[in-house]
Image: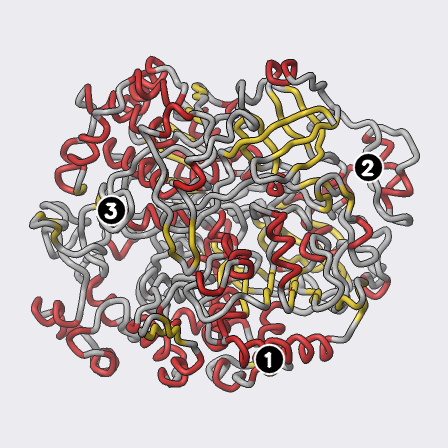
């Protein structure tokens, strides 16, 4: 609870730590710093060295001070960190003053990342559980024992019975290598945190206009004339991003509109705060569009030339008059008319959203509704407009792009035969050998190759373990689980997760910290903890939310007995016998694959999204010359990067030698494609039901095709007579793939892209965005009541989906919603972030500077609800969920939440249903702050397209403890 501190320490750390030595003393903040031996300047540099393992902290007396440039490992803004290193020890840090992203600023988390690397609570050496106790073992023992068990499971149940859960903690090279590793193991049961944060964004947005990512940038918000934030709290989740938002607010007088069920710190900056009932985003947006359409305020010419299907949207919106919108959302119609008028009168405006909009059982409908609002206003493809989707982790964008997903190979190629053939060519691999690595599912007289089937998403891995085998669309249950850089307390249904962890044959955690995975279960054996390094102990690229890539330098050598992630992957590939194949084009130094070689390999293959032009050399040059880039346009002015966009935001077309500058604003036709301009992607064919899907008479600047056109193929080049522009080498490469049928995505030479752009055309075509997605459960986005809703009067009018099986697992919808839980669980429960912590919180709650700031897990309750329930501010309460779990937390009585709504942060772990699990951590690795996880009481519910978990609108009951 964000209150003034008395004792500036966390409760219950192990004896002997810095904080426990101060715990008995009553002191203010200044006294705390003095007793810690830290000056104000020292705090800024975070040069704490108390309590270190001596081998990890060599003397810093004498020796040259070396500056290393890295990137913060928390949210997706991409803030530069300048690390001060002396004699191999990281002794201080400064924010990157030259960075166009953070402009010399840090948030609380960014200012303390040195402690993330040097933290005494890290996992220091490999460990295995023996008779319920963690014991130290060697790396050789760990790899051999784990590998032997996995190979046994593979022989008995097939490769799909080992689940490889990856992470946004990876840099791009590690993410790419991890997806390749899963392919060589022979499974698509591989996924990462994007599934449970923005998978509904990627699916919804990509199926609207072609790419599933932020269209503009944090910096481009400087150009916005209005800012509409829904389901996002950047003041806490992405604090430095607020610099860019407030710049537009102050310099452009841009009205800031914040729509959120909770009055957040971001809402405190708003010109207009719109409170609405959790889970009613579509109804709210359609309520805005009702006023826009009713008054003829839409951009009719933009819609005519660049949008398909808006008439069907218009028909649905007719239903959402102000009275119906208020009945469903609770938001007055007069307020929405005022908001609509504000957006119309202040164009271009940008729409920003985060997980408040995505984590719903109809999350894909939400993200498409937000996008359709921008299409109706004509705010797409313009500076100051777009959909600025704030991703939650430093490389969740890159890990998604590079394919750490259950439904695609790197670059969103999918899993069809053609996608595997493409990557086999990139890897120079025998496609038949790859096919032989995968299982087949023989059921009901049919044989299905698992190579082409989506894997189980991370949101449902527990069902892969617990569901009856005959109900799964794979040969056998999940028997081994690898949680590599993943916080399990970031997922719902934690009591079932505990059961699943205990049922597994093998549980492996690979992480710099032991995480809640070390303590949630009551296993006696078959569990391992492997210490991976932080990203400050390696080098490589990382992709910010705006699609820009930045290169991290290695700050320090790996501490303790930890290893870099890509080395651990190589050790497992040694054990499994495919190192020579997997690394045939990647050099290995000792046991560590060379990062730059991995970059160059994904450069050779990810043509779909333009991850091909960002060579290591170009990225390093950008980092060295950050001061050359304009702080709004991100374009370099003079110098060695002249004309480039900072970080070469994808798509950066063609090869690095082609020198494309990157694409700062997706779908911006006011610039030539060669300078970063773009059209909407022709991803959905050229017509639908006899109607044209290509752009109508509009095109990007200087395009030689003065109308819409399909995606480029070799045949299209031949038809246009442009094939004469290909080099002999490019022509030979194209012929080797599929001759005239080769397209811009599968041409390994890059020739088709180069020639298209020579004629100022977009390689992926020039089409209309589509407002209707005919291959989704709801072609037109619909409001559907949450599975656990207390508005029983609305269920008949806005029911959820029928139960179905997809992503290999049975998924419940109507069978849950038809039960009325609202009498026993009357309060809507939502969740979100705090500025002090990140994700599951393991590393940030292990950081003394952050742990001091927020020491207790809490629930926000409206004063009326608190008084009716006899709950006092600051006292313990029990929070119970409709699926049987309950947690003990502190009450914060506040009007931040409306009546009937409660909020909890999701960063806590280490307590379970009132029980403190501190003694289950390996000695010395327990976080300073522990607490209950909100996800213990969060309930079942998954998006109808992506299996995103629903964490923003379930039900609960609250009572005094």
> Disc number at residue 773?
3
Examine the rendering and report whether any part of residue 376 can be seen: yes
In this figure, which residue is indicated by the disc labeled 2? 9
Q: Nearer the viewer, mark 1 or mark 3?
A: 1
Name the image colouring: secondary structure
Q: Position of residue 126 (x, y in %)?
A: 74, 69
Asked if the residue under mark 2 is in contact with the one under mark 1, i.e. CB atoms within 8 Å, the reply is: no
Q: Nearer the viewer, mark 1 or mark 2?
A: 1
Q: Residue at x 41, y 43 (%)?
A: 813
For mark 3, give the secondary structure.
Answer: loop
In this figure, which residue is indicated by the disc labeled 1? 152
Q: Nearer the viewer, mark 2 or mark 3?
A: 3
Q: Position of residue 622 (x, y in %)?
A: 48, 57
Front residue (pair 914, 661): 914
Neighbor class of circle 2 (other Cα within 10 Å; few <14, some 14-19, many 20+) is many
Neighbor class of circle 3 (other Cα within 10 Å; few <14, some 14-19, many 20+) is some
Determine the CA span between mark 2 and mark 3: 52 Å
Q: State which quarter of the image contains the C terminus.
A: top right
């Amino acid at each position: 609870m964000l209150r003034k501190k008395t004792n500036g320490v966390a409760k219950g750390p192990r004896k002997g730590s810095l904080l426990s030595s101060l715990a008995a003393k009553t002191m203010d903040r200044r006294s705390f710093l003095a007793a810690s031996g830290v000056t104000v300047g020292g705090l800024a540099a975070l040069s704490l060295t108390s309590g270190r393992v001596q081998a990890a902290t060599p003397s810093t007396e004498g020796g040259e001070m070396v500056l290393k440039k890295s990137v913060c490992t928390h949210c997706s803004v991409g803030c530069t960190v300048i690390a001060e290193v002396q004699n191999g020890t990281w002794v201080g840090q400064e924010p990157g003053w030259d960075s166009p992203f953070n402009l010399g600023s840090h948030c609380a988390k960014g200012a303390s990342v040195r402690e993330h690397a040097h933290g005494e609570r890290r996992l220091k050496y490999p460990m295995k559980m023996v008779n319920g106790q963690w014991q130290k073992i060697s790396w050789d023992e760990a790899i051999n024992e784990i590998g032997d068990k996995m190979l046994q499971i593979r022989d008995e149940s097939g490769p799909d019975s080992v689940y490889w859960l990856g992470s946004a903690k990876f840099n791009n090279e590690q993410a790419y290598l991890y997806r390749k590793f899963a392919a060589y193991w022979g499974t698509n049961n591989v996924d990462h945190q994007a599934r449970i944060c923005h998978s509904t964004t990627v699916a919804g947005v990509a199926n609207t206009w072609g790419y599933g990512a932020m269209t503009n940038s944090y910096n481009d918000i400087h150009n916005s004339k209005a800012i509409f934030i829904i389901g996002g709290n950047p003041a806490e989740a992405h604090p430095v991003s607020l610099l860019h938002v407030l710049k537009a607010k102050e310099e452009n007088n841009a009205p800031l509109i914040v729509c959120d069920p909770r009055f957040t710190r971001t809402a405190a900056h708003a010109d207009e705060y719109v409170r609405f009932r959790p889970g009613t985003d579509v109804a709210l947006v359609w309520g805005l569009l009702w006023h826009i359409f009713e008054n003829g305020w839409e951009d009719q010419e933009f819609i005519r030339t660049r949008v398909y299907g808006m008439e069907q949207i218009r028909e649905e919106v007719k239903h959402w008059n102000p009275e119906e919108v208020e009945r469903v959302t609770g938001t007055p119609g007069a307020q929405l008319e005022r908001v609509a008028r504000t957006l119309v009168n202040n164009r271009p405006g940008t729409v920003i959203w985060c997980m408040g909009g995505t984590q719903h059982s109809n999350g894909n409908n939400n993200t498409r509704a937000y996008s359709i609002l921008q299409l109706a206003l004509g705010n797409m493809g313009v500076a100051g407009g777009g959909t600025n989707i704030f991703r939650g982790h430093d490389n969740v964008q890159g890990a998604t792009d590079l394919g750490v997903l259950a439904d695609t190979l790197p670059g969103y190629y999918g899993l069809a035969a053609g996608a595997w053939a493409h990557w086999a060519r990139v890897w120079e691999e025998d496609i038949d050998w790859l096919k032989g690595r995968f299982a087949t599912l023989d059921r009901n007289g049919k044989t299905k190759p698992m190579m082409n089937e989506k894997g189980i998403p991370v949101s449902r891995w527990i069902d892969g373990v617990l569901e009856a085998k005959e109900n799964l669309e794979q040969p056998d249950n999940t028997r081994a689980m690898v949680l590599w850089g993943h916080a399990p307390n970031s997922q719902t249904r934690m009591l079932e997760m505990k059961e699943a962890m205990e049922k597994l044959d093998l549980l492996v955690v690979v992480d710099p910290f032991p995480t809640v995975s070390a303590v949630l279960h009551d296993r006696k054996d078959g569990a391992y903890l492997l210490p991976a390094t932080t990203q400050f102990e390696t080098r490589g690229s990382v992709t910010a939310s705006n699609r820009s890539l930045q290169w991290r330098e290695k700050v320090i050598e790996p501490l303790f007995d930890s290893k870099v992630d890509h080395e651990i992957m190589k050790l497992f590939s040694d054990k499994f016998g495919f190192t020579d194949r997997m690394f045939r084009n990647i050099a290995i130094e000792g046991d560590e694959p060379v990062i730059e070689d991995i970059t160059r390999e994904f450069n050779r293959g990810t043509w779909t999204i333009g991850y091909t032009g960002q060579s290591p050399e170009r990225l390093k040059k950008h980092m060295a010359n950050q001061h050359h880039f304009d702080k709004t346009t991100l374009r370099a002015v003079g110098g060695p990067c002249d004309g480039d966009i900072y970080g070469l935001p994808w798509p950066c077309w063609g090869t690095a030698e082609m020198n494309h500058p990157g694409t700062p604003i997706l779908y911006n036709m006011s610039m030539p494609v060669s300078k970063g301009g773009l059209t909407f992607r022709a991803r959905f064919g050229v017509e639908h039901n006899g109607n044209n899907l290509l752009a109508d008479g509009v095109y990007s600047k200087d395009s030689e095709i003065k109308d819409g056109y399909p995606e480029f193929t070799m045949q299209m080049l031949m038809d246009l007579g442009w094939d004469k522009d290909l080099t002999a080498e490019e022509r030979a490469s194209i012929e080797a793939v599929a001759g005239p049928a080769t397209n811009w995505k599968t041409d390994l030479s890059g020739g088709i892209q180069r020639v298209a752009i020579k004629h100022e055309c977009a390689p992926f075509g020039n089409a209309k965005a589509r407002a209707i997605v005919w291959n989704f459960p709801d072609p037109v986005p619909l409001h559907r009541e949450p599975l656990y809703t207390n508005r029983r009067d609305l269920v008949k009018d806005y029911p959820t989906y029928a139960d179905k099986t997809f992503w290999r697992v049975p998924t419940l919808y109507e069978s849950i919603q038809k039960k009325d839980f609202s009498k026993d669980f009357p309060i809507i429960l939502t969740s979100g972030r705090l500025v002090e912590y990140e994700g599951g919180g393991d590393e940030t709650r292990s950081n003394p500077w952050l742990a001091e700031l927020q020491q207790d897990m809490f629930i926000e309750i409206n004063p009326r609800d608190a008084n009716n329930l006899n709950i006092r501010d600051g006292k313990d309460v029990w929070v119970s969920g409709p699926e049987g779990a309950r947690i003990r937390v502190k009450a914060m009585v506040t009007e931040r939440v409306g009546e009937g709504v409660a909020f909890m942060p999701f960063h806590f772990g280490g307590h379970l249903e009132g029980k403190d699990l501190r003694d289950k951590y390996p000695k010395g690795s327990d976080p300073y702050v522990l607490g209950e996880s909100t996800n213990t009481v969060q309930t079942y519910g998954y998006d109808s397209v992506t299996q995103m978990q629903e964490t923003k609108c379930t039900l609960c009951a609250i009572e005094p403890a």
